[in-house]
Image: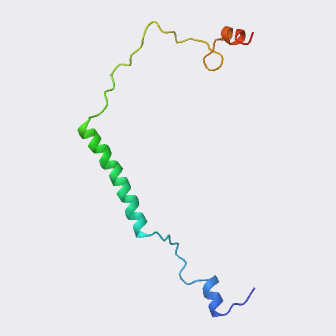
Amino acid sequence: MISFDAEHRAVHYPADRRFRIWILPSLLIGTGTALLLVVAAAWIEVAVIGMPHIPPVPKVYPNTSQDHTAFLFGFDTLTFSTSFL
């Protein structure tokens, strides 16, 4: 084992080994202010405009087909195969 003098021992084996995270107070204040501004803007929008209307029953149109088979990017297989001829 390497023998350290007092100064090197204090660097390699400090007496206080608590984990610390140093954060600038201005960074915390700026982040907190930005979050508060976003939340305040959302509440002001709800107070002025209101919540969006969501219908209790979704609109389903009976003439639309739900079993449409498409190949790639919505092209039918027939139109996709004949488009290169």
Q: Residue furthest front?
A: 85
Please identify the quadrant where the C terminus is shown.
Answer: top right
Residue 37 horizontal/vertical position (percent):
33, 52
**Color theme of the render:** rainbow
Can you give x and y, in whole percent of width and height, for residue 30 in the image?
39, 61
Q: Which quadrant is home to the N terminus? A: bottom right
The answer to which image quadrant residue 12 occupies is bottom right
**Front in this rendered view, residue 13 or 71:** 71
Question: Which residue does the image show at 46% across and 69% down from the upper left?
Answer: 23
Residue furthest out toward the left: 48
Image position of 71 (left or right of 85)? left
Residue closest to the far top: 63
At 28% from the left and 39% from the top, the residue drawn is: 46
The residue depicted at 40 percent of the width and 69 percent of the height is: 25
Image x and y of residue 41, in percent: 31, 46
Query: Residue at coordinates 60% horizontally, 17% vertically from top-left?
Result: 74
Q: Position of residue 50 (x, y in %)?
A: 26, 35
Q: Nearer the viewer, residue 20 or 44?
A: 44
Q: Is residue 49 left or right of residue 63?
A: left
Residue nearest the observer in this picture, 52 or 75: 75
Q: How many marks?
A: 0
Whether 72 is drawn above or below 43: the answer is: above
